[in-house]
Image (spheres, rainbow, N blue to C red):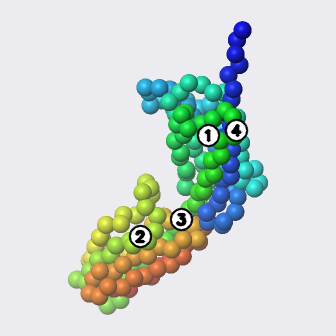
């Protein structure tokens, strides 16, 4: 007598942090990683419904873990590791996720006195971190220029702030617009 292996079901909602709504048509890919390897094998592709709900039903293989990746154009990718030992076949495994729309800020540094010997030191205090496209949070220096533009990525509908360290401390902030670039003028 062969016993049928029950399936796993992972379901939940994918929320759009930038607009506080469910995210429709987000691509969801599920990979399995066998015990003792790092190789990700794609086992399922799906997409979220109009309200952001999704459901993944898949064969319960003996693997170490699953990797869930959520993607949508102009959004930051979300990657989640789900270990086999945390899943159950008795009920749906509820996993809700949130992702952010991409937005950009143009840091527009303007040398107001047109003095090339003047410099400015600054550092990001609020904004997106830990991504390949992110601007660094470490102290930066701009010198020998009349004007400088630096484009930094951020979460949509979120604050981006820069602290000016030169002369006196001053903070410049702006709220970024999803899918667009806003201009933050910083005189020095």
The span from disc 4 to disc 1 (Cα, nearest Å) is 21 Å
In the image, farthest residue toward the left: 117
Residue 59, x across and y down, in percent:
66, 27
Give the labeled residue for mark 4: 91
> SS class of the residue under badge 2?
strand
Front label number (3 vs 2): 3
Determine the CA span between mark 2 and mark 4.
49 Å
**Above or below for 22 versus 108:** above
Q: Are marks 3 and 2 in contact (CB under 8 Å)?
A: no
**Which residue is label 2 attached to?**
150
Depicted 13 relative to depicted 31: above or below: below
- Marks 1 and 3, Cα distance to the nearest angstrom? 22 Å
Q: Earlier in the sequence, mark 2 or mark 4?
A: 4
Q: Between marks 3 and 2, how big is the CA–CA gap?
A: 17 Å
> Residue tagged by mark 3?
155
| Circles 3, 4 touching at the beta carbon (< 8 Å) | no
For discs 4 and 1, the disc positioned in front in the rendered view: 4
Q: Secondary structure at mark 1?
A: strand
Which picture quadrant has residue 113?
A: bottom left
Q: Which residue is mark 1?
A: 29
Q: Position of residue 145 (x, y in %)?
A: 31, 78
Would residue 73 appear left or right of 115 to someone viewing this image?
right
Find residue 152 and report its horizontal and vertical position in percent: 45, 66
- Indicate which disc residue 63 carries: none
- Depth order, front residue of 5/28: 5
Q: Given contact means CB atoms under 8 Å apart, are the residues at marks 2 and 4 in contact?
A: no
């Amino acid at each position: 007598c062969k016993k049928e292996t029950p399936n796993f079901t992972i379901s939940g909602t994918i929320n759009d942090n930038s607009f506080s709504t469910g995210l429709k048509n987000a691509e969801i890919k599920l990979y399995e990683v066998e015990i003792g390897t790092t190789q990700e094998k794609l086992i399922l592709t799906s997409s979220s419904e109009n309200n952001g709900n999704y459901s993944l039903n898949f064969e319960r293989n003996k693997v170490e873990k699953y990797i869930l990746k959520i993607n949508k154009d102009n959004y930051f990718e979300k990657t989640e590791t789900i270990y086999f030992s945390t899943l159950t076949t008795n009920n749906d495994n509820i996993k809700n996720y949130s992702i952010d729309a991409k937005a950009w800020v143009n840091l527009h540094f303007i040398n107001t006195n047109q003095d090339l010997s003047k410099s400015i030191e600054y550092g990001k205090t609020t904004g997106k971190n830990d991504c390949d496209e992110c601007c660094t949070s470490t102290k930066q220096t701009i010198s020998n220029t009349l004007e400088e533009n630096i484009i930094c990525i951020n979460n949509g509908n979120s604050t981006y702030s820069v602290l000016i360290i030169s002369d006196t401390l001053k903070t410049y902030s702006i709220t970024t617009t999803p899918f667009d670039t806003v201009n933050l003028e910083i005189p020095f």
